[in-house]
Image (cartoon, helix red, strand yellow):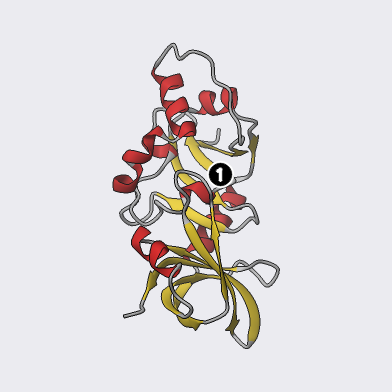
Amino acid sequence: MKKTTYIQFKIPKSVQIGQADGIVKRNLKKAITGILSSIIPKANPDFENKIDLVEKWIVELDNETGIPEREIGMDKNGRIIIKMPFKNNYGYWTDNNLLLTDFKNHFETSEISQDSFENYWSLFEKTEDFETTLTDFKIQTTGSDGGHHYLMAKVNYNGQKRDLIAYFTNKSDEHKIKELDKVKICGKIVDNGIEQSLSLLETKLLNE
């Protein structure tokens, strides 16, 4: 008998939850409405500004306890932008009281294989340091919780012109870029294949 189950699900844009009658429902409602945002930055310092961008979650859960053990977050284009626990980041779902049955009851879940999960998990680690200077870029925002800002631009990478999305670690850098015509940034670049945009994680602004 397998020891773990792997599920994937999307967070609905609008979720209706009835009156909470227990800690599970209370925590689910908090997670969805963002009340937990006050503690997320402390628990997940590297991914604070990326959680709002996650469209699909993939979660590994222990069959015996039902407790989440690992989680992966993808944006709307299928790029892996979060994996936890990782370094000093404890996790989003792994830091809540939700169990396997709760996920199945409250979300439209489907199972994936362990091999698929491990493949996604390892993709995130295939990163390298990357630094670039941009003069032609667009600033996008999530539009939620005051909005997190990120950059979109085209860069030369391994001899090819590729789309790049840069996710900043610090909120202060997000504000600074709005006043700049030229930015110098560095971070960890993730290449999920030629069909996908490059993701620059842990992005820092180097402008003096």
Q: Quadrant of the C terminus?
A: bottom left
Identify the residue under disc 1.
58
Is the residue 84 above or below the residue 174 in the image?
A: above
* Residue in view at x 61 percent, y 35 percent: 12
Is residue 21 visible from the viewing direction of this image?
yes
The residue type indicated by label 1 comes to: Ile
* Residue 196 in the figure: left or right of residue 100: right
* Residue in view at x 65 percent, y 84 percent: 160
Q: Secondary structure at mark 1?
A: strand
Q: Quadrant of the N terminus?
A: top right
Figure quadrant of residue 202 = bottom left
* Residue in view at x 31 percent, y 40 percent: 39
Is residue 65 visible from the viewing direction of this image?
no
Is the residue 79 above or below the residue 165 in the image?
A: above
* Residue in view at x 30 percent, y 54 percent: 88
Residue 193, image x, y percentages: 65, 69
Is the residue 125 above or below the residue 5 in the image?
A: below
